[in-house]
Image (tube, helix red, strand yellow):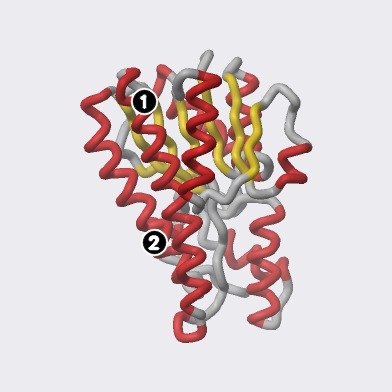
Amino acid sequence: MNQRVLVTAGASGIGRAMAEKFAARGCQIWVADINSKSLQECPETWRKTCLDVTSERAVGMLYEELAAEWGGLDTLCANAGIAGPTAKVENIAVDDWRRCLSVNLDGPFLFAQHAARLMKPAGGGAIILTSSTAGIYGYPNRSPYAAAKWGVIGFMKTLAMELGPYGIRANAICPGGVEGPRMEGVMAREAAEKGTTRDAIYQGYTSGVSMRTFVTSEDVAEMAAFLASDSGRFVSGQVIAVDGHTENPDPKVP
């Protein structure tokens, strides 16, 4: 699997797990991340760029450098996103709404746009967008995030239609609750808002999952690697949940 792979938010969490999975399979890795400290902790063999995924200029410069150094791109994992505010819709500030949509939608758009320009002349490639189960079911108290992740799915479906004739596949992975610092932060905020404990919030989330557990970043990375591989060569336009099967998308606090 000797591919040239670009991962956004690739210095930690799901993105880091994706980069490590591809690297273990012999791929060249380029990670983009807004956290310079996390980038410094990535392997020296990886190419690294510190940027804000919503900056059109910064994304354009990254792709110019990538094209000059690599000559093309085989796989894009547009994974960067933010949780946005946790609040009832009537209490969400419009600036928080716009920032959440910008990172979660403008970022994938800019990276996929440039990826398409490299992949079309090459006659193939894989674009993998990280959505969420919130993009399938909705998500109470997280309306900006849910709206953005639904948008990611619509964008992906359109990419698959436009780029399929050029041999380029597009798919969206929808993680459920993922073990790690980001989900811990979400649960901490919800616990504070509802006057309960982190463990009660965790039970509420997992009670709506058939397998009664969160997934790991490695589980999500494994799906990304499959979608970019020859085994997934005819999988395109698909929304694939890696979540242990969400039965009830409305978390309940016991």
Image-quadrant location for residue 123: top left
Horizontally, is 238 left or right of 190 in the view?
left
Q: Nearer the viewer, residue 76 or 133?
A: 76
Residue bearing mark 1: 119
Residue at x 57% of width, y 54% of height? 177
Q: Residues within 10 Å of mark 2 (few under 14, many from 20)?
A: some
Residue 148: x and y in percent read 42, 60
Residue bearing mark 2: 137
Q: CA distance from mark 1 to mark 2?
A: 32 Å
Q: Is residue 56 above or below residue 251?
A: above
Looking at the image, is mark 1 or mark 2 earlier in the sequence? 1
Q: Nearer the viewer, residue 202 or 81?
A: 81
Q: In the image as oriented, which residue stretches furthest toward the bottom? A: 90
Horizontally, is 58 left or right of 163 in the view?
right
Horizontally, is 246 left or right of 199 in the view?
left
The total of numbered circles placed on residues is 2
Q: Secondary structure at mark 2?
A: helix
